[in-house]
Amino acid sequence: MIGKSLRNRLRSLTKSLLQLNLAILFGLASFNLSAALIIVEPSENSYKDIQEALIIAEPGDVVRLTGGTFIIEDGLSLDVPGVKIEGEGMDASILEFSNQKSGAQGLLVTSDNVTLQDFAVVNAKGDAIKSKGADNISFIRVKTEWTGGPKTTNGAYGLYPVESENILIDDCVAIGASDAGIYVGQSKNIIVKNSFVKHNVAGIEIENSFYADVFDNLAEENTGGILVFDLPDLPQQGGHHVRVFNNKVINNNTPNFAPEGNIVGEVPSGSGIMVMANTHVEVFENRIENNGTTGIAVVSYADDYEDKSYYPHPRSIQIHNNEYINNGKNPDVESNDLARLLFELSNGEMPDIFWDGVVPVSQMFFGQNQEDRMIIDEDGSPSIITLDPIKYILPLLDPVKRDINEFSGNIKPLQAVKLNEVL
Amino acid sequence: MKFFKSILLVISFVSIPIKAIDKQAHIEGRFFSKLSDYRFFKDLTNQIPTDEVLPYKLQSELFSDYTYKQRFVYVPPAMKVGHEKNKVFMFPVGSVLIKTFSYQNTMSELTPQLLETRLLIHSEGGWKAVSYIWNEDQSEAYLSLVGGTIQTSFSDEDGNIRSVRYSAPNKNQCKECHQINASLTPIGPKARNMDLILSYDNKSQNQLAKWHDLGWIDQDIDFMKMINYLSLNEDIEDRARAYLEINCAHCHIPGGAADTTGLYLMLEETNKKSLGFYKKPVAAGKASFNLKYSIVPKKPNQSILLRRMKSMDPGIMMPESGRALKHAEGIEVISEWINSL
């Protein structure tokens, strides 16, 4: 009896000695009974120092990046739930990836309940910060930037949460992405607010996602300010319930610099807000100013696809109480088919609001389902152009309609997104 | 007296090294700090396993910067290995898969170099992945949860010396490839990739038959044909699909790290769009090379998939990790295949 318990005690002693050994090996104590603070300063081995911290961190721990520039050569990753990575400010704690040699992104997060706060990821070779399958993730005062201005060779996405639930992006900055500055894909329950996006192809893009609120953001000098897209042949599609409100969408006239082959490469420069193939999207109380092609475009997915469950047309779109200032004055007719078509159809009078009018064939003849109709309720009198697809196909008939009253109806506000309480 | 005896017992228990493999440690998911602590090898440096550990081989291997890989498996005594078509073998809890990466340098004056040994340990809480990096005098490999970069040189088949920035993966990177849905899983040992003859103590035998004889497998196994993509006399379609299966499909599979793209490259995938035929990229960015589709039949140079295999830019290259060199032979296989479509 005594022998056995002694043996157990010896065993557990060996075990804790081993742990101690490991702890010494890592240069940090691993006995954190309560949350630990792991502080990392820039050094010759910044990658290793930060990556080590991200691996030994335990749920509840904080990894603190001091002020300064961390030169990183390999992609960083976090896979421990409940960890916070915080710096001393988006302009103070900089993760700089100009010399990156491996890793498809600067930082990858794959665990739940993570907060990223007050630091910047700069010049990543691929995406800046990607989180995949990481529920309850918060990006707070984080900046992603490619510092050489808008370039095709910049990484695709700045902040890039995908396949996640409960995403908060608050007070962030995203500059220079060759696809989208803030991109939320195939996710559910999303808030993007108080953020500033500039010199990206798409400022903010919500793609194949359910329940998103995008508000109080400034989207300036992108190719397209805010996009709500749905694409076929993906694990999650049928995007729905997206509210875009109280944003400033200004001067989004940067020539499209997306590499060809990417869907955002088809967005005309000068696009304010663009909605493609989603259901239940409410666009309201935005200030939409100086976007050279059009203020708001509502379009169908125009390419072929295989997936029979995919629905390519926008449905139940509501547009109201937006402010339109000086849009459509400099349309992207040189390089963009959609802008050129619109320019021809409108005889150069580009509208504040454009709907391509494309609906399923049966609805072309018998009219749209009542609940699918687009509702527009604006105080000012924005100009609108919609197309009649039947007349568009037939010669000699003018397919262009300009009557905004055709879209009158009662606005049925969508509910605000509520993020789940973090466990 | 009884107490004294117990003390003796304890002392003897502690001081005499345990020779056997500590299956309990695997079950509990404990990592030892040195590779030798696992007692998988009679001769660690020469990678000679004990009788409890069985070598195995794959038809088609993942390209890992031209390293030579030795694979071993430990299955606890009297346990069974399960099988389901198209899936990796279901090893019982307590099993360990062992893979050692080295440069053999046979065609040059460079000495052989052991780089790392990776273990996949099947604990009661699921599979755990861990890497051990070899020391300079090649006498021991040490636990490394944070991975490491090994700048070294090796000689290729023609005796040319090449330099490489070899990366041993950290714990998270192990998971990036080995995770399907929320759990870690082995990748290589599928029946279809193991249907080949191996020499066991001077006796040659089909691996699956050997596993049968060992009592690991006690069912008939149904599997698709898979070949070695390096076999020049095989059909190019079979070679290409074997290549994509073992080099890409661990991420490009529903539930895998790249499933957000909808590009699925498993051997059993039959949907052409999912395989990339005229499929547009979703989130490729500059990795699209201004091209429209993953695969354009007969047009390798217009196929994004091949272009990403050729790239060395971390923001473009495929696979995303575990490669610091181009795989010339793989590029040839895929190029020839796309040409043939």
Image (cartoon, grey):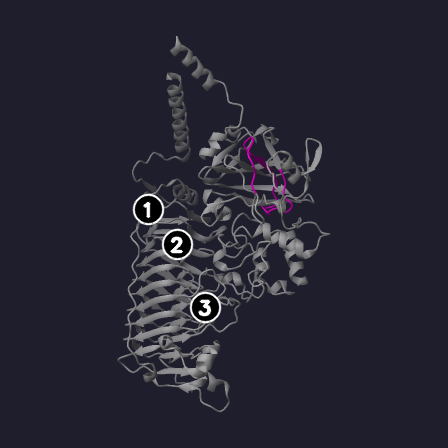
Chain where mark 3 sits: A
Mark 2–mark 3 Cα distance, whole angstroms, equals: 23 Å
The residue beneath circle 2 is A121
Badge 2 crowding class, 10 Å Cα cut-off, few under 14, some 14 to 19, many 20 or more, is many
Q: Residue furthest front?
A: B219
Residue nearest the viewer, comparing B128 with B224:
B224
Q: Secondary structure at mark 1?
A: loop
Residue A367: % across, % down: 41, 81
Between marks 3 and 1 in the image, the one whose residue lies nearer the viewer? 3
Q: Residue furthest bottom?
A: A396
**Which residue does the image show at 50% across and 21% down from the upper left?**
B17
Nearest to N terminus: mark 2 or mark 3: 2
Q: Is residue B117 left or right of residue A374?
A: right
Nearest to N terminus: mark 3 or mark 1: 1
Residue nearest the viewer, comparing B186 with B247:
B186
Nearest to N terminus: mark 2 or mark 1: 1
The residue beneath circle 3 is A264
Residue A60: % across, % down: 32, 43
Q: Secondary structure at mark 2?
A: strand
Q: In the image, is residue B68 part of the stretch drawn in magenta?
A: yes
Q: Is residue B235 left or right of residue B29?
A: right
Q: In the image, is residue A223 part of the stretch drawn in magenta?
A: no
The residue beneath circle 1 is A66
Asked if residue A292 can be seen in this view, the reply is no
Region of the chain picked out in magenta, as a range: B56-82
Residue B81: % across, % down: 56, 39
Between marks 2 and 3 in the image, the one whose residue lies nearer the viewer? 3
Above or below A292: residue A191: above
* Amino acid found under the numbered disc labelled 2: Val
